[in-house]
Image: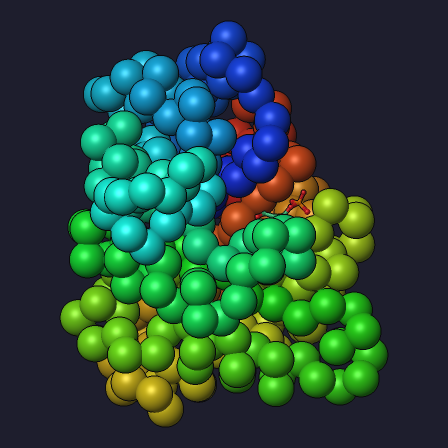
C-alpha cells in the first residue's frame, strides 16, 4: 500500500505572521489524521519559523527549490544542506513555474534532484505538459522526456527518495482540473514508464501526486483513481480550512 501524500505549495505567498497562523490552524485541524503524509512548502524566508512551530508535529516541511551545489559563489541560491539545516525533509524540484519563468531545463532538474537526494532530502519531482502540447497529442512524449531526463542516472535506491507530481500546466491556477480520467491516464503512463526504467516493484511503491486546481470538492474523485497517490496543492493550501478539508478527503 502506498501512503497518500497531500502537499501544499505556498509559492510566493505568506510572510512570517501569516505563515505561522496558517500552520498553527492547520495542525489543530489535522491532528486526528493518520496514514497520510502531510507536507507544506513555504518560501525560504519562513522555513525556519514554520519548522520550529511544527517541531512536534507530523507535518513535514519542504523547500520549493534548491541549487545543486553545496556552497560557493552562487549569489541568491539555497543548497540542499541549507534546506536540511532549516528543518526540511523534502524539496519540490522542476515545478512548471520554474521551468517556464526561470529557464529550468531537464538537465538542471536532474542535477538538482541528484544533489537533493545526496543530501538526504526527498525530491518532489514535477512534470506536466502545456495546453499546446496536449492539443498536439504530445502529452506522453513530453512526460516521457521530462521523466527520462529528470531522473537520468538515479539508482533504484535513490528513486526511493523521489515522489512524482504530475501537474498539467493548463490546470495550474486556472480552476480547470484535469478530469479524473485524464489524470489517471497520465499517472498510469508514468507508473508504466518507471516500471520499464526500473522494475515493477519500484513502480508499485512510488507515489505519484496530481497537481492543478485541486480543491476540497474534487479531491475525492481524484483520490479513488488507482494510480493517484495524493495531491500537490497550490491555491487551496493557502487557507487552513480548505487544505485541511483536502487532507480529510476520506471523511
Ligand atoms: P493550484 O492548486 O493553485 O492550481 O496550483 C497547483 C500547483 O502548481 C502546485 O504545485
Colour style of the rendered protein structure: rainbow
51 and 24: which one is in front?
51
Can you name the residue that lies furthest to the top here?
17
140 up-or-down from 72: above or below: below
Quadrant position of residue 30: top left
143 up-or-down from 40: above or below: below
Quadrant position of residue 208: bottom left
Left or right: residue 153 compared with residue 47:
left
Q: Looking at the picture, how far across and down is residue 134, in whole percent?
A: 75, 77
Q: Looking at the picture, how far across and down is residue 179, in whole percent?
A: 73, 65
117 up-or-down from 133: above or below: above
Residue at point 66%, 36% (across, down): 235
Residue at point 24%, 20% (across, down): 55
Residue at point 73%, 68% (across, down): 130
Q: Does residue 241 appear in the picture of this structure? A: no
Residue at point 32%, 21% (across, down): 48
Left or right: residue 114 compared with residue 24:
left
Q: Looking at the picture, how far across and down is residue 145, in whole percent?
A: 52, 82
Q: Looking at the picture, how far across and down is residue 24, in whole percent?
A: 43, 14
Left or right: residue 22 compared with residue 215:
left
Quadrant position of residue 68: bottom left
Amino acid at each position: 500500500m502506498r501512503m497518500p501524500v497531500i502537499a501544499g505549495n505556498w509559492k510566493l505567498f505568506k510572510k512570517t505572521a501569516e505563515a505561522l497562523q496558517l500552520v498553527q490552524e492547520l495542525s489543530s485541524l489535522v491532528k486526528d489524521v493518520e496514514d497520510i503524509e502531510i507536507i507544506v512548502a513555504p518560501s525560504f524566508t519562513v522555513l525556519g519559523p514554520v519548522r520550529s512551530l511544527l517541531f512536534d508535529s507530523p507535518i513535514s516541511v519542504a523547500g520549493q527549490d534548491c541549487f545543486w551545489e553545496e556552497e560557493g559563489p552562487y549569489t541568491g541560491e539555497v543548497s540542499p544542506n541549507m534546506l536540511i539545516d532549516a528543518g526540511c525533509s523534502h524539496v519540490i524540484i522542476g515545478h512548471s513555474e520554474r521551468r517556464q519563468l526561470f529557464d529550468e531545463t531537464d538537465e538542471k532538474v536532474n542535477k538538482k534532484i541528484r544533489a537533493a537526494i545526496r543530501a538526504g532530502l526527498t525530491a518532489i519531482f514535477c512534470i506536466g505538459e502545456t495546453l499546446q502540447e496536449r492539443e498536439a497529442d504530445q502529452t506522453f512524449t513530453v512526460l516521457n522526456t521530462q521523466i527520462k531526463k529528470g531522473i537520468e542516472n538515479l539508482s533504484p535506491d535513490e528513486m526511493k527518495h523521489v515522489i512524482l507530481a504530475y501537474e498539467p500546466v493548463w490546470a495550474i491556477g486556472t480552476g480547470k482540473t484535469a478530469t479524473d480520467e485524464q489524470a489517471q491516464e497520465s499517472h498510469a503512463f508514468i507508473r508504466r514508464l518507471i516500471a520499464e526504467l526500473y522494475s515493477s516493484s519500484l513502480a508499485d511503491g512510488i507515489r505519484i501526486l496530481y497537481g492543478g486546481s485541486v480543491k476540497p470538492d474534487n479531491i475525492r474523485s481524484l483520490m479513488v483513481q488507482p494510480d493517484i497517490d495524493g495531491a500537490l496543492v497550490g491555491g487551496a493550501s493557502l487557507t487552513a480550512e480548505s487544505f485541511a478539508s483536502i487532507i480529510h478527503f476520506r471523511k
